[in-house]
Amino acid sequence: MKVSGKIALVTGAAQGLGKAFAATLLENGAKVLFSDVNSEKGQETLKEFEKRFGQDNVVFVKCDVTSQADMEAVFQQVRDRFGGLDIMCNNAGIGGESREMWEKTVDINVKGMIRGTYLAMDVMRQDKGGRGGVIVNVASMAGINPNPFGPVYCATKFAIVGFSRSWALNPECSGNGIRINMLCPAFADTALVADIDNTTVGSPTAAKEFIDKIGIMTPEYVAEGFLDLVQDETKNGAVLKMGKSFGKVYHEY
Ligand SMILES: NC(=O)c1ccc[n+]([C@@H]2O[C@H](COP(=O)([O-])OP(=O)(O)OC[C@H]3O[C@@H](n4cnc5c(N)ncnc54)[C@H](O)[C@@H]3O)[C@@H](O)[C@H]2O)c1
C-alpha cells in the first residue's frame, strides 16, 4: 500500500509508540488524525506535528477508547475532515494489575481495540461504499508468551492477537478489501515502561531488572515494523514480533 495520500487514524498517540506510528505515517505523506485521552499531551504533540508536517495534514481529537460516543465522534471527524479512512491503528493501551486497576486494563486494551476495529471495518468495507484498508492492532510479545509480571496485561494482549487473527481469516474482511495485522513488540522506551514497577505484580523491581538485562527498543525502531504491516499488501493476519533479547535484535513474522 502506498501510504502517500492515504488517511489514517491512530489511538493513544499523544506520546510513545502511537506518536511514533503517527509520525512515520505523516513522514510518508499520509493525512493523520491522532487521538488520546490526554488532551494536554495531545495538543503539545499536535503543535510539534503541525510544524514538521503542515497544519492541513494532521488533526488531534481528545478521545477515550472506552467510550463508544467518543470513538464514534472521532470516526465522524476523520471522515468530515479528510474524507474517509484507509489505515487504522488501535494502539491505546495501559498496564495495571492491581485489584483496583485490572478491569480498566481490560476495558482499554481489549474493549477499546474491539470498538476501534469494528468502527474501522464499518467505514472501510467495500460492500458498504468503503474503499478497503488496513487495521493494525498493537498487541505485544506478551500476546505471544506468558508474562509473569503482568498476567492481566498478558491476557489482554493474547485477546488482541486472537481477535485480530480470527477476523483476518473471515471473508467479511478479506472479501471487503480489509487487512488486519498485529504488531507484537517486546520492551520499547515509553512512559508505559518507565512506570512498569508501579503497574506489574511480584517483586517491585523485577520487571525493570529483566528489561535492563534483555534491552529496550526505541519507538522509532518499532515504527519501522508498523510501517511494514501497513505497506505490505501480502500481509493479512500477520503477527510481527519485534524486540531485543540479550543484545540480539529480532524482527520476524
Ligand atoms: N512500550 C512497550 O514496551 C510496549 C511493548 C509492547 C506493546 N506496547 C503497547 O503499545 C501501546 C502504546 O503503549 P506505549 O508504550 O506507547 O505507552 P504510553 O503510555 O507512552 O502511551 C499510551 C497512550 O495511550 C493513552 N491512553 C491511555 N488510556 C487511554 C484511553 N482510555 N483512551 C485513549 N487513549 C488512552 C495514554 O494517554 C498514552 O498517550 C499499548 O497498547 C501498549 O500495550 C508497548
Image (tube, rainbow, N blue to C red):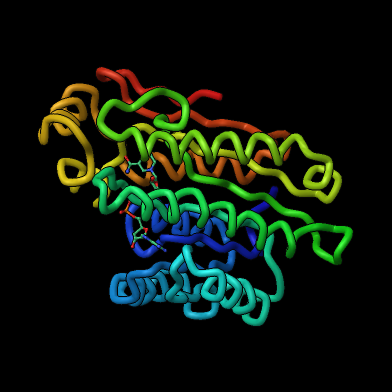
- Along the line of sight, the residue nearer the viewer: 98 or 15: 98
Q: Residue at x 30, y 35 (%)?
A: 150
Q: Residue at x 83, y 41 (%)?
A: 171
The single residue placed furthest to the front in the displayed view is 99
Picture coordinates of residue 247 (x, y %)?
26, 19
Q: Residue at x 51, y 23 (%)?
A: 252
In the depicted view, which residue is nearer to us: 185 or 204? Answer: 204
Q: Residue at x 33, y 70 (%)?
A: 38
Count of marks overlaid on the render = 0
Residue 35, how many percent across, how many down? 46, 68
Residue 205 placement (x, y as % from top left):
10, 33
In this picture, residue 169 sits left or right of residue 120: right
Q: Quadrant of residue 68?
A: bottom right
Decide: is 170 above or below 119.
Answer: above
User: Residue 229 at x, y = what percent?
Assistant: 59, 40
- Left or right relative to 245: residue 113: right
Residue that lies at the very extreme toward the right in this rendered image: 127
| Direction from residue 120 to residue 104 in the image, left or right | left
Assign the C terminus to one quadrant of the image: top right
